[in-house]
Image: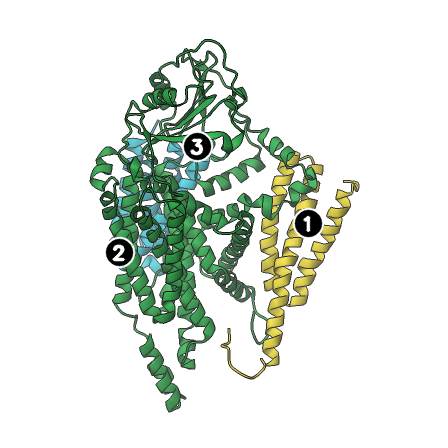
Amino acid sequence: MRPDGKPEGLRQSMSWLHTWSGLLLGWLLYAVFFTGTLSYFRDEIDDWMRPELHASVPGPETAQRALDAMQRIAPEATTWTLSLPGPRQTAVEASWREPGAEQGRAGLKRATLDAATGERIEPRETRGGAFLYRFHFELYAMPRVWGRWIVGIATMFMFVAILSGVITHKKIFTDFFTFRPKKGQRSWLDAHIATAVLALPFHIVITFSGLVLLMFMLMPWGIQAIYGGDTNAYFAEVRGARPQATAQGERQRGGRQEAGAAALAPVAPLMAEAAQRWPVHGVGSITVNAPGTPRATIELREGGGESLANRGQARTLLFDGATGRMRDRPEPAAASWVRATSNVITGVHLGRFAEPAVRWLLFLSGVVGTVMAATGMVLWVVKRLPERRKLGRTPFGHRLVEVLNVGSIAGLSVATAAYFWMNRLLPAGLEARGDWEIRGFFIAWLLCLLHPLVRTHRRAWLEQMLLAALLFALLPVLNPLTGGASLAQSVPHGQWSIAGFDLTMLALAALHGWVVWWLLRGKPAAKPAPRAAAPATGGVAVKAQAWERAQ
Amino acid sequence: MMAWSTLFLAFAAFTAIAASMERHGDDLRLAPQGRALAWRAGGYGLLAASLLPCLARWNASVAVTAWLGLLTFAALALGLLLTYAPHAARRAASAAGAAGLLAALLFLPL
Amino acid sequence: MVSLAPAAKPPPSLRRYRAAVASRTVAAVAGGYLLAAAGAAVGAHAMAGLGMPRADAALASTLLAFIVHAVAAMWAFGCASAWRAWAGVCLPGVVLALAAWWLQRGGTA
């Protein structure tokens, strides 16, 4: 859109739309991208933030020890579920239901067990990775529905920004491998375009699937039209294509315990059978129904999904509890093509199916997307520098964007690092320490939003990036000093959730450190002199010089 | 291993495509000269072929997801190489192509 | 994007520009949503009527609705004038909304 109202082509109008749909909610979108990318590793973050677990080293005996422990802890339970350690988790997470317990989450009891001994561990109270994950689509400190609406609207802005960006980009193929450094605005544009185009399928799928994941709230009208208010009927019909693990149907409600206890068959041969069938993911969890009774069943669930068409649902094997014999299960019906399409795109977004190699690809693509958002916001400022030079001062809107850029981009890194630091600095026994960790996150973020108000733009970036780099770099040092397993321990033991976290923090530190180095290296050669010399009165030239010095 | 194979093959494929482009053709001096279309077609063909190692390891939907992700980083690597060390790009691409093919053949899960 | 200069009212061209932006924005956001939502409802009925299983029709129309909203928003800013934005987005939106309401009341599907 042009202020003078003259007609313009599609590329120009889409360029305008791209700028505004990207800028207006860009800071929120950056935060959503950043926390979403970290959420791919939320289990690992959970592990790192509970150093009491770090002594737990998984081994071949883990499943049996855990089952034996459950026999001691909850012999009367109607179900036991054990989430087994693996590359993403270093301890056993157990949950069970006592007879007569409530339905759903309220009736579940939980414990964390050491993978080697089966002993109960009492980790410190923390929200862990779940805080970042929930923030990603629900924000914080507001009713969940509000948070989801805000993020949902932002997601539609993002979707429009992506589509308009593609339309406006004239040389998408010619410029595919092009990056021109040290050219100021041109370089920022190249960086923004490269991170956008090279991972374009990811960005489109992630954004669109983000809308789909919130569709019951954002766009319920299709379902409403056909089902009236009866959403349960919709869910039933849609799941009719995917019968839920039939073990749940066989589960006893209310726990009718039959006379005659029966010992559970040894689990090792069952695990071996499953491991053979599932070489990629291995066994993710074991669910025992009606343990200690003759009707007991043992269900092994794969540690990931092999196909996205059924939303990466894990395969299961069912065994008779007393004898260890495998039972036949009907194959779940294939999903319809509509359902399969929806499953594939939402499956990619959630990444629950993913084994480490694929998970890393999703994470790194998320990093690329986060950089795309950041470079876009910075590009807006850089592009308007010549205009500001001519004016000799910085308009309010430009200053606002500058301050918000530093605070919400660099500031978010500082806040996240602060969250992890708080996890270790706050005493383990502190009341409501989970809430305090989160308060630390927001206080750090707020300070980072205020800091750029009293610093020049360049200094603000430099100082916050430096702080983030230091905080991230020292986390692997803080880890063993505050009761966790250092890299020297976690790597040889194969505790990749903990080691991976430490190594990723080092990588983040390196990334932020590189930005600091780049900022310290000096500005690219700008060319202000000729312009100021031209029609300038003495006053404008002086103003321009003063403005330059202030940068 | 299959993922690395795809990554290397895609890198080689992208280099072939880049070589057929006006902007990068000089840096990537192909022999014989002027067969831009053949290089482009070959590049796209190799790019499609780079999907195969992924399909060998994963189910179709996961394979395509992984493939697209790997393409991103192959293209990124080439972009950086062309910017900062264009003369190394040709050798890197040949090495990558060979490594990718070797990895696929030696470690193909059958 | 003009700085907060003291005193003077914005010139008529700037006021016109801002009015156009506001108008197109309403068309894109509210009109677009109406078009998408009504389209989802009518589309679901249509697809189910054409034989698609109910759940699939509901799901497919919802997915398409998001695309419709995005495209409508882009069109509202890409077309030649704010009037056209309203004509192209809000008008069909109202028509579809009426159709959806009529179908809901049990019109011949």
* Relative depth, front residue between A240 and A163: A240
x%, y% of residue A189? 40, 63
Gap between marks 1 and 2, in whole Å?
Answer: 52 Å
- Name the residue that disc number 2 marks: A470
Q: Residues within 10 Å of mark 2 (few under 14, many from 20)?
A: some
Identify the secondary structure beneath mark 2: helix
Q: Which mark is residue A62?
A: none
Q: Tell me the kind of residue under disc 2.
A: Leu
- Is residue B48 among what the camera can see? no
Q: Along the horizontal axis of the image, is A432 left or right of C49? A: left
The tint of chain C in the picture is yellow
Q: Quadrant of residue A522?
A: bottom left
Q: Are marks 3 and 2 on the same chain?
A: yes
Q: Nearer the viewer, mark 1 or mark 2?
A: 2
Residue at 71 percent across and 58 percent down: it is C91
Residue marked by disc 3:
A305
